[in-house]
Image: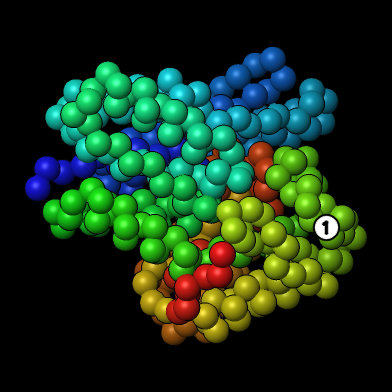
Amino acid sequence: MEPFAIVCDSGHNLPPDLVEKKGLAQVPFVINFGLEGGLDDGTITLEEFAELLDRYEKGKGYPTTSAPAPSRFVDAFVSSIKRGLSRILTITISAKLSQTYDAAVLAADMVREEFPQSEIEVVDSRSGSMAEGMLLLEAARARDLGWPLQEAKRLVEEMRGRLRLLAAFESTKYLVKSGRVRSIQHLLSTALSIRPVITVKDGAVALYGRMRGRMDNALDRIAEEVQRTRKSGTVSVIEGIAPDLKEMLVGKLCQRLGVSREQILESKIGPAFLVHTGKRAVGVVWEQEAPAQG
């Protein structure tokens, strides 16, 4: 069976060494600082990027993000084809959060016209961050086992309905600035004693709950939900730049799930997401027992 290439955007938040190990071709988001534009391509560290955010927030206007142009997906697809991989599975961030999926679909149509022998499938993750990342790992597992492209696509589409994401924030002002939460903006309290817990439902950001008091209470709620619904498989903890919150959440999960730290996949929120979450954010992605609704 001819192997297939795996193409993705940069919203998966997988650790860079894992991206390289799994041979993923990554198309970066665009990050706009006023009139200046840059790519989420790993050329600066997350800490350096966070310093830029602080600087722009204080005086020059906060940055925005935008989807990759279709031409960037075209380049990734053509590069794979020229390497002898004419079958390609592409997984993107939710179509309700970004135009990235549409850009990839358009690019796939363009490349099929030029290379009729190619087979390019595009899957909407209906989520983002490590939920997208775990779908990519599943696709890579199927590829490495020699599964055909269409079967790998089916596995990914089945798995996406079982993945859950919960994240807690010390401040929701970045989410509000992002424009991704207009439907629940009125529910996001700015009071210091309220800690919102956010999820992704039907591909869009939704409010899971609002916890009073310290972040510790919100993380307790998250760990409790993981314990209640987890099926098996990988549990991933993601953070902005908040090592204390990450340590707290990892500890709670290890205790409740009876797992060691080595069984938890730890990662960082990438620059394109940090724009929308801020540094003081932490979350978890896991596979639940019953299929998610919607």
Q: Is residue 38 above or below residue 18?
A: above
Q: Residue 148: x, y in percent?
A: 18, 51
The residue depicted at 60 percent of the width and 70 percent of the height is 248
Q: Among all residues in the image, which is located at the extreme top?
A: 35
Q: Quadrant of the C terminus?
A: bottom right
Colour option used: rainbow
Q: Position of residue 216 (x, y in %)?
A: 71, 73
For label 1, count other residues whose C-alpha is less than 10 Å away and answer few (under 14), some (14-19) or many (20+): many
Residue 60, given in percent of the width and then of the height, sits at 79, 23
Residue depicted at 84% across the width and 60% down the height: 187
Please, which residue is most extreme toward the left here?
Answer: 1
Location of residue 244 with respect to 119 vertically, above or below: below
Q: Which residue is mark 1?
A: 188
Q: In the orientation shown, which residue stands out farthest toward the right?
A: 191
- Seen from the viewer's position, the closer of residues 278 and 183 is 183
The amino acid type, in three-letter code, at marker 1 is Leu
Where is 15 relative to 105, above or below?
A: below
